[in-house]
């Protein structure tokens, strides 16, 4: 039984690394939310209205964790040349387009590369 090993294009490796870096930045945001939560707790220990800001922080933290996990999964899928990961990276890049100017440029470049026939064929043949 022979397994054919296909070379992963450098562009795909760069896009996957970008997703891992994005996940790390989201986790740093999660750390900031955690620190803000502790600051709120220490500032207002006997305040019943503390539930509202902590609730918002919790929802924000859950969103950041979900987004970080999605970025890691997509990055891993890209490294394994999975076609679903190509589509997921395109969708994530569409959501990054409003983040002008850097998100627009990076998201646009990722979309441009991943929708080309060359990239489509490479992902579908693995």
Image (spheres, grey):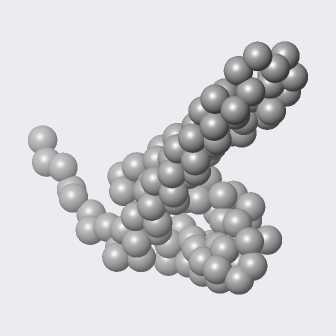
Q: Nearer the viewer, residue 57 or 44?
A: 44
> In this image, 88 relative to 100: left or right?
left
One can see residue 71 in this view: no
**Is 37 situated above or below 122?**
above
**Is 115 situated above or below 60?**
below
**Is 22 situated above or below 50?**
below
Q: Position of residue 2 (x, y in %)?
A: 13, 48
Q: Position of residue 60 (x, y in %)?
A: 71, 39
The quadrant holding residue 44 is top right
Q: Nearer the viewer, residue 10 or 17?
A: 17
Q: Position of residue 35 (x, y in %)?
A: 57, 41
Q: Quadrant of the C terminus?
A: bottom left
**Is 14 situated above or below 19?**
below
> Which residue is at a point 50% across and 72% down the rendered structure image?
119
One can see residue 38 in this view: yes
> In this image, 47 relative to 38: left or right?
right
> Which residue is at a point 71% across and 83% down the rendered structure image?
101
């Amino acid at each position: 039984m022979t397994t054919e090993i296909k070379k992963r294009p450098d562009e795909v490796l760069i896009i996957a690394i970008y997703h891992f870096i994005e996940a790390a930045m989201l986790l740093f945001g999660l750390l900031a939310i955690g620190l803000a939560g502790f600051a709120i707790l220490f500032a207002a220990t006997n305040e019943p209205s503390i539930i509202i800001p902590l609730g918002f922080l919790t929802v924000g933290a859950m969103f950041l964790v979900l987004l970080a996990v999605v970025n890691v999964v997509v990055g891993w899928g890209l490294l394994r040349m999975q076609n679903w990961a190509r589509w997921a990276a395109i969708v994530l890049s569409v959501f990054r387009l409003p983040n002008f100017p850097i998100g627009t440029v990076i998201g646009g470049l990722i979309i441009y590369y991943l929708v080309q026939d060359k990239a489509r064929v490479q992902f579908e043949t693995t």
